[in-house]
Image: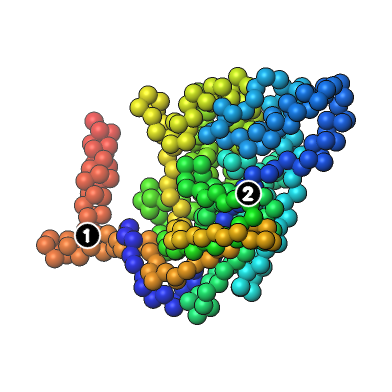
Amino acid sequence: MVISMDRNKFFWNTSFPSLTVCPHKRIDDAKLHEYMKARPQIFKSDDDRNEFTDFIEKLSNATFENYDQLPMNRTFEIDSSQYMDLLWNLSFVFKPELNSGSTNKLYLQNTITELGICYAVNSKVAVYNSYRYWQNNRWDFVKTNDTTLVTVHPLDGEIYAQIINLSCAYEVYFHGYHEVPDISKQRYSFPAGDYTTVELLALEILTSNDAKALSISQRQCRFAHESDILETSPIYSFNLCQNECRLRLALRTCGCVPHFYRSRTKYGKKYRVCDFEGIRCLQTIKDVLISLKSKIINIDCDCYANCDDPNFFVKAYRSRAWFLGSNLQWGISEYPKMQLKREVIFSMTDFLVYIGGMAALFLGCSLLSFTELAYYLTYRFCLGFCRSFWRK
């Protein structure tokens, strides 16, 4: 295998940067009020209601980084296995407007990440982490039309996409169309009331069709359908593999999994979702969970890179006050001048040809001669031995 460089930039399309946006406001005040109103036996006073409001808002934004800020005084008769269902039912309706300079239309998809309930744009993976997909206990491949993914070409000129009227402060991950956010990767926070423009650089790594026939260990990467090592996802990506590695580490160390991970496996097994005791345990190893590195705990994730992997890097971003609310504009500032490609330069066929050529040159024989030699040294020898044995 070799990674070659292609510089014919006019001969390929470049994937438009995908992103996942996580709004800071995730709980709908009206839904929360109705929830507490329907349970007067639990929320008897203003103190109870204020305490629950603080709890549910911090739970909706809970991650490995800020679990210690979660108030863990009362359970409010809510089992930990119901956390995600409750957060979804009380979630804030997030419906900003999307537009782009391309002919393909962009869509916003809800997706559950390590930062809670977020929304992805131009993604083929977000649907597998959506609440409805999990709730329906689905493990099938979702058919997607590639035309729904936005690609750009140098002749298209500058193309930017916009999310208009985000209505609150938010965090953003930029990634390829076949990836999900990862808590260890860099993310960007933008305040409410700003118009933000982000310029990105792109670099794609693709894999040739010849390499698909090779084993995973040979090509050192995995395609989306090669998800046999994952128990909680029907498709593979590097970040999904990292997420599941954290899940297994939390399960092995604390005996439970965080509420923002899928607690049911494709084999029918169901994991216990962390309650207050489990969350306190997770706090003690949060640095290990984020970095997946430890001198004490043995961690072996066995995560290979994606075979087809668009990468995006933030070149610059600028924000200015905007009277029409929070807006985000992003796009590729400069089209990539090169593309990397995994290719097979020495296959098994090439190996046989080289061996046969060298044998003919130096020994005056071919591979067929080696086969005949093996035949006479094994089968013929055993046959003669057996005949002499029976004669005796």
Please determine whether, in this image, residue 338 is positioned above or below residue 192. Answer: below
Query: Is 119 left or right of 136, judged from the image as shown?
Result: left
Q: Quadrant of the N terminus?
A: bottom left
Please say if the residues under marks 1 and 2 sit with CB atoms less than 8 Å apart.
Answer: no
Identify the secondary structure beneath mark 2. Answer: loop
Q: Which disc, if any, is residue 344? A: none
Going 63% across and 61% down the picture, which residue do you hit? 322
- The residue most toward the left is 362
**Image position, residue 222 (x, y; %):** 46, 51
**Mark 1 = which residue?**
355
Q: Earlier in the sequence, mark 1 or mark 2?
A: 2
Q: Quadrant of residue 64?
A: top right
For the question of whether residue 266 can be seen, the reply is: no
Residue 323 x, y percent position in the rendering: 67, 61
Left/right of residue 365 with respect to residue 90 in the rendered view: left
Seen as rendered, the residue at the extreme bottom is 155
Residue 298 falls in which quadrant of the image? top left
Would you identify the image quadrant in which residue 262 lies? top right
The tag on residue 169 is 2
The residues tagged by marks 1 and 2 sit, at their Cα atoms, a distance apart of 64 Å
Establish if 193 lies above or below 208: above
Q: Residue flagged by tag 2: what amino acid is it?
A: Ala
Along the viewing direction, whichever of 218 and 342 lies nearer the viewer: 342
Mark 1 is surrounded, within 10 Å at the Cα level, by few (under 14), some (14 to 19) or many (20 or more) other residues, namely few
- Residue type, mark 1 in image: Ile
The colour scheme is: rainbow
